């Protein structure tokens, strides 16, 4: 069976099950990337080959989990629809969620990236660092999402699971969005239109992440800008429920993972229990 030829049917099934378009494209990207790396003489559903691919030592835990989820959904569909007799990935235990320490990107790194970036990338960085948007949420911002209110600009954010939220924009974020829209043809709705063959489409989330990561020096990434937003929002408000709402999380426990330690307050507490007077 030509499994590549089955991909259009699989992506249609994903859309029929109410997956967001961003999720559908991510899952399809992972599977196509895997299939493109399989040698012609190798069965793409060979368990040992699948394991070797997912065991890539260069991947971070989050990357591995995301790719494994996409491949698992794909092989499960092949099995349940009778296209294969057994699901090879059913033998692999579920991937454990990584427990990582929050890594809010330092402000000097962000400022340096803003100074050296194009208008487009400046808007991406600002939306992540000052509005807490995910790369997938940044990619789908459109003109109609910007709301002008008496107290300032806000943004309707299209989050995971088709959940929408409204996030107030800082003046810097509103200005960055306005500058980027000025550079975009008024006939196009997207803040970040695709430069590829689909002229009426928005930039893909993966590309947004690549552009932001390239702008940030060191090992900082687009996701650490979101950590920065959560940390600063909680430091300013001390309201975890509010930060949860702004971040678009379904559980406060998830939000807590993003909030970095207030080192100034922690240092004050630690100094207060020092044995040295």
Image: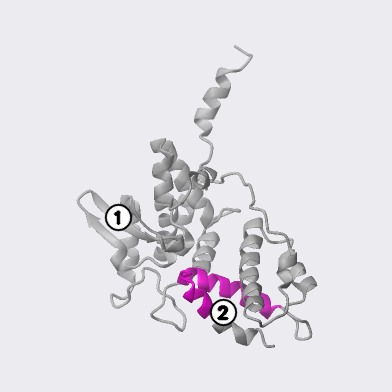
Of the image marks 2 and 1, the number of the one nearer the N terminus: 2
Would you say residue 22 sits in the magenta stretch?
A: yes
Q: Is residue 3 left or right of residue 150?
A: right
Quadrant in which the N terminus is drawn: bottom right
Residue indicated by mark 2: 10
Question: Mark 2 and mark 1: span between their CA atoms?
Answer: 37 Å
Q: Is residue 273 left or right of residue 131?
A: right
Residue 93: x percent and y percent? 72, 60
Q: Which mark is residue 131?
A: none
Q: Is residue 121 visible?
A: no
Residue 71: x percent and y percent? 65, 71
Q: Is residue 208 left or right of residue 100?
A: left
Q: Badge 2, how many Cα within 10 Å: few under 14, some, many 20+? A: some
Q: Badge 1, how many Cα within 10 Å: few under 14, some, many 20+? A: some
Q: Is residue 231 above or below residue 62?
A: above
Residue at image coords 33%, 70%: 183
Q: Is residue 105 above or below residue 195?
A: above
């Amino acid at each position: 069976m030509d499994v590549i030829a089955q991909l259009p049917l699989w992506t249609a099934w994903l859309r029929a099950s109410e997956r967001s378009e961003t999720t559908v494209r991510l899952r399809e990207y992972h599977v196509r990337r895997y299939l493109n790396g399989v040698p012609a003489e190798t069965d793409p559903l060979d368990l040992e080959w699948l394991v070797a691919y997912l065991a890539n030592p260069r991947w971070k835990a989050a990357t591995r989990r995301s790719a494994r989820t996409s491949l698992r959904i794909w092989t499960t569909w092949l099995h349940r629809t009778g296209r294969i007799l057994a699901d090879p990935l059913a033998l692999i235990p579920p991937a454990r969620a990584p427990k990582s320490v929050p890594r809010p990107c330092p402000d000097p790194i962000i400022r340096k990236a803003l100074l050296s970036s194009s208008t487009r990338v400046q808007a991406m960085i600002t939306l992540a660092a000052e509005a807490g948007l995910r790369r997938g949420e940044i990619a789908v911002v459109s003109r109609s999402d910007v709301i002008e209110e008496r107290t300032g600009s806000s943004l309707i954010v299209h989050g995971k699971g088709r959940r929408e939220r409204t996030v107030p924009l800082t003046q810097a974020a509103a200005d960055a969005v306005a500058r980027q829209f000025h550079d975009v043809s008024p006939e196009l709705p997207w803040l970040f239109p695709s430069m590829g063959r689909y002229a009426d489409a928005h930039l893909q989330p993966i590309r947004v992440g690549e552009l932001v990561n390239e702008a940030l020096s060191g090992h900082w990434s687009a996701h650490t800008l979101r950590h920065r937003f959560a940390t600063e929002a909680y430091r300013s408000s001390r309201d975890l429920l509010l930060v949860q709402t702004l971040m678009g999380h379904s559980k406060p426990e998830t939000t807590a993972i993003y909030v970095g330690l207030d080192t100034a307050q922690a240092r004050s507490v630690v100094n207060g229990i020092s044995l040295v007077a």
